[in-house]
Amino acid sequence: MKLRPMRTAVILGGLVALAAVGCATTAKSPTIGTGDPVADRQRLMKNVGANWADIQNKVKAGAPETVAVNAEALSLHAQRIPSLFPVGSGTDKSKAKPDIWQKWPEFEAAAKNLENRSATLRDQATAKDGAAVTATVGTFGRDACGACHTPFRVPPPQQQPAQPRS
Amino acid sequence: MQIKHVKSAVALGSLVALALASSATGQSTTKLWTGDPVADRQRLMKLNGASWADAQAKLKAGNAEAVAVNAETMALIATQIVALFPEGSLTDKSKAKPEIWQKWPEFEAAVKNFGSQADKLKDAARTKDLAATEAVAKEFGRQACGTCHTPFRVPPPQQQAPAPPQLQPTR
């Protein structure tokens, strides 16, 4: 009999606190995205891929100094990547490996690596140093994309190693 | 004595709930940005401007399809703008007008409109139809950028309307 009001009080306190948190966060930080982290990150990563394709096209077309805009997009998108991988957001449609959440600090470091390398590429393009841009682009797929995709993404079918011949 | 216990129980419950709430959001909302909303939104809007400039350069070169990536970059930026204008984030360096917070629903609607216009540009570019993409681009500055910048941004010096001609004193 004595315990019951106390339990109610604990629950009541919890609810009040949660409500306060809810209000504080909705007012201060309107949500970014649709609320579906898998859809949101797939959309973001598609634009990362499209900006990377645009960078390669521009370098091929002999205009390496024009890639600054794309590199800056990659750098800003990279900042958002960790926030789009909440715990438990691995679904059938997701190619995310569980290793992301098992090795979270390494995953965060890999996203930061993309941010930093993209910023380097942006600065080289802004400085109109075409040779530096071309050199960075040459290793970007391995050093920036691959450094995260190899440990943390299930490879798409066409990139899987060929079946050994029997 | 009993009331004291109940009080501490309420406090305990609050603390536990707060801890749970913050750990639940801690990883799902890894800190975005630098914490300086003016610097963050200026960086974002510079990318917006550069993406629009890149899109226009590609159109001039007759490459409609390549505009899609810039339009999608802008559409993604549109999803982040509102979050970067917290109340009270008006400083000397900011060109934001106080109207943003006085007419918040209109500001949100203007950002949403920008996102829709960027989607429209992206869809046109994906058809690879140069004329159709140019038609959307022609209206983009006014309909996508201007509908938000005109009411909610202090115009940069070179874009300010020329001063009305001085009236000659009449005798």
Image (spheres, coloured by chain):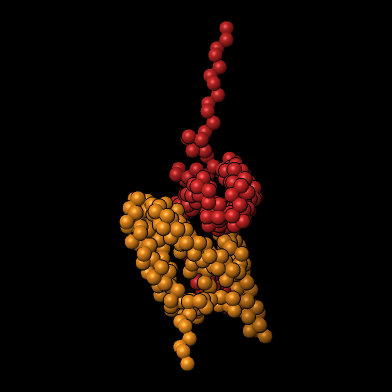
Q: Is residue B44 above or below residue B96?
A: below
- Say which of A155 and A38 sits in front: A155
Is residue B3 visible to us here? no
Q: Colour of chain B?
A: red
- Left or right of residue A63: residue B170: right
- Say which of B128 and B33 sits in front: B128
Is residue A106 visible to us here? yes
> On the image, which quarter does residue B76 sit in?
bottom right
* Residue at x 55% of width, y 12% of height: B169
* Residue at x 51% of width, y 66% of height: A45
Q: Residue furthest right?
A: A1
Q: Position of residue B116 (x, y in %)?
A: 63, 53
Q: Position of residue A146 (x, y in %)?
A: 42, 72
* Residue at x 41% of width, y 58% of height: A60
- Left or right of residue A120: residue B104: right
Total labels: the figure holds 0
Q: Position of residue A112 (x, y in %)?
A: 41, 66
Q: Is residue A50 above or below residue A91?
A: above
Q: Residue furthest bottom?
A: A166
Q: Position of residue A114 (x, y in %)?
A: 41, 65
Q: Residue furthest top?
A: B171
Q: Is residue B71 above or below residue A156?
A: above
Q: Quadrant of the N terminus of chain A?
A: bottom right
* Residue at x 52% of width, y 55% of height: B66
Chain rendered orange:
A
